[in-house]
Each structure stands twice: as structure tokens, then as C-alpha cells.
Amino acid sequence: MTFESLCTRDFLPGDARDPFGAHILPIYQTSTFVYESPEKIMEVFRGKGEAYVYSRWGNPTVDAVERKIAALEAHGLQKDAKALSLKALLFSSGMAAISALFMAALKPGEKILTSGNIYGTTVELLNSLMHSHGIETVYRDLSDKSALEEALRDDKKIRMIYCESPSNPTVRIYDLAMLSELAHRHGATLAVDNTFSSPYLQQPFRWGADYVLHSTTKYLNGHGTALGGILLSADARFMEEKAWKMRKILGGNSNAMEAWLLNNGLKTLPLRMDKHCDNAARLATFLESHRAVEKVHYAGLDSHPDYFLAKKQMRLPGGVLGFELKGGLRAGIRFMKHIRFCTLTSTLGTPDTLITHPAGMTHVSVPKAQRLANGIGEGLIRMSVGLEHVNDIKADLERALAAV
Ligand SMILES: Cc1ncc(COP(=O)(O)O)c(C=O)c1O
């Protein structure tokens, strides 16, 4: 079945049908499950059998959506001449998935290698909580192969490369095949936050990633109706014994209603992503030629340094773009004050176009020096381009740019 058709299905080929023949995935809105006999319940609590126990451990609606996203991330991929099989776990948010991955995959004394050019709260997690748990972070430019090689060679405690591609908020694209080869040669793993792409635009397992995660709050849900996160890996043992246990103990599980809303969004993922990308490409070209704009960050522009990498690694370069105004912070504030049609808010991946000022919003918790070193200037504007008619978005940008 094609990726597009798989997205529309509530039950995957080979899945058991609902016992009542429901057409659409039912919402199993229950905290616990009941058993006829004490022997059965004791067996289930000992971890034997497939039965459900308690929705923090697992829930049929949540499981169905986990299997579907696993099928999408693995779609068309092979491992050892067999179809790639992935395990997925849904979490209450992207941050719950990221923190569970770090806690499950790394031990105190081990280190993560990443760039400072990632989601602000992930930087905050690394610099505060992970640091106090004895897991340190080494920051390098993930496009600088020799700097990465040197870091991995000199510090054997680095056990994971962590990467967002495209990155938040400067929309850099990183070479996942290069990163996985480097990581594996030095006995480390590669984890990829695929939130900005979705599996429709990019499948990091194709390029050798060991772990993939998403904030499902964004494109996968696609409508801004539910928070969520997902972690995926082909390492079934890691997922069942370590990551699942972390979710069970820390309680960062998703729930039936949020999973169901996520599944509704998945049904239109390819249609939405095509339109997000088409609108983003048109607006990037428009912004690049505007006199008030200093620079546009969008890998779909042939002037962008990551243009060829995006072509190799992604179906399309994504629906998020960044741009810097010539007047810096003052111009950024004036621009946002004159926006009428687009929405000023911090999330991304919804049907309406969203405008964010990273230095003052999503990345406010990142120290200013670290922000600037990673290209997150005071005048940088991030746009999550929506599904509206492109002329409406353009007219709003034209008016606001005229005012800066
Ligand atoms: C790239 C990326 N990863 C992770 C997160 C965290 O996800 P959540 O807000 O669902 O916890 C975000 C949130 O904006 C993000 O943009």
C-alpha cells in the first residue's frame, strides 16, 4: 500500500478489526481493564501475555496510532533484505518523548553531541536536567564533519549524536547519512527529531538513524488540537524494556483521546505537507527579493547552502522558513505589530500561517550568546506556512514589511 493510502486507514492491513465492526478507530476512554479471574490478572501483572492492564502501560487506541506511525516511518524501507519493522511509543508531548529517550538510552557519565541550533526547551533539558543527572552535552556545528570526528575521537563518553533536520528555528538541513556513519564508527547512536519534516518528507531510518522522534503536536496532528510525542526505533528490546519502562515509571504516556485526534490528522498528512511546502516555496522566493529582508532561511531556495542536501534527503524542503529583517529586533517588533492575517503564536504545523519570534518566544530560555552563535539573531522571524491561499499570506507580509 502506498504511503498516502496508509495514512487514510484506521486499521492497518493485518490488524484485527474492531469487535463491533467500527469503521473508525474507537476511543478506548478507560483508565483500567478488567479480568475474569485472579490467575489471569496475576499473569498480566507479571508481564505475561498481550492483555491490557492500565492505560499508563498501554491502551488499544494509543497502540493503533503507534503502529500506524511506525508503519509510516518504515514505509518502503528494508533491513537485512526484510521490510523494516519499527516499534513506536506515544508520549504526552514531544518533550516527554525526548526526555524518555535520553533517560533510557544514556547512563550518567555519558554524553550527547548536538548543535545549539535545536528547539529551545531541548537545550534547556540538556543544560539543566540532563546535566544534573550526569549526562553532559557537547555542542558542535553538525555540518562540520571534521569537528565532529575530532569530538568523537577525543571523547569516548559521547554515546549519541542528537539532530533536528530541518532544525528549529534556522531551518538548517543536516546530512543524516554522514551523521549515522560517524556515530556508528565511534560506537555511538544517531537520534533524529523529525518534527519539521514528518515521515512524508523524510525518513531518517533510510539514512541510518537509530532513534527517530517527533513532537506530534505539530505536522502529524496538523490541527493544533492535541499535544503529543512519539519515539521510534528498530531496536525492539530497547523499546520494550527500556523506553516503555521509562514511560511507565515517569508517566509521560499519551491517552486515547489525544491519540485519536492525532490519527485524524494523519489521514491528510501528505495532502497538507504538499500544500505547506508549495506555499512556503512561493513565499521564500517573494521574501528573498524584498528590500526589507536581509536573508531567507529555506532550503528550497537554490541560494541556500543546504539546497542539494535537502534534495537528496527530503521529498520536499518543508513548510517552515525563517527570515531576517534588515532592521534587527526593532524591525521584527514593527513587522509583528502589523501582521493581521497570519497568527502570532509559538507552535507550527497548523492549517493557518503562524509567525514566531524565536529569540523572544521559543528560544527565550537559551542563553543569548548560545542563540547568536547558532544564528538565532534578534531580528529572526520564523514562519510556519499554512494551507491558506498563498495570496492572502503574501498580502499580509507585504503590508507588515512596508511598515518596518
Ligand atoms: C523540533 C521540536 N522538537 C520538540 C518539540 C517539543 O514538543 P512538545 O511541545 O510537543 O513538547 C518542539 C516544540 O515546538 C519542536 O519544535
Image (cartoon, helix red, strand yellow):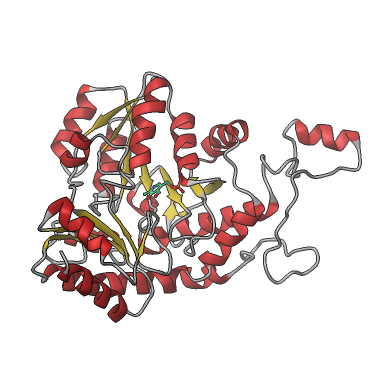
Q: State the image quarter where residue 91 is shown.
A: top right
Q: In this view, does 324 lie above or below 179?
A: below
> Residue at 17% of width from left, 51% of height from top?
329
Q: In this view, does 102 lie above or below 81?
A: above
Q: Is residue 328 above or below residue 35?
A: below
Q: For the C terminus, which image quadrant? A: bottom left
Image spot of residue 133 (x, y percent): 42, 21
Q: State the image quarter where residue 12 is shown.
A: bottom right
Image spot of residue 158 (x, y percent): 30, 27
Residue 258 appears in the picture as rendered: yes
How many marks on residues?
0
> Residue at 47% of width from left, 72% of height from top?
4
Residue 2 appears in the picture as rendered: no
Q: In this view, does 375 lie above or below 388?
A: above
Image spot of residue 383 (x, y percent): 29, 61
Image spot of residue 205 (x, y percent): 39, 51
Q: In this view, does 28 lie to the left or right of 160?
A: right
Out of 100 and 176, give the one closest to the viewer.
100
Out of 72 and 195, give the one closest to the viewer.
195
Out of 135 and 244, give the one closest to the viewer.
135
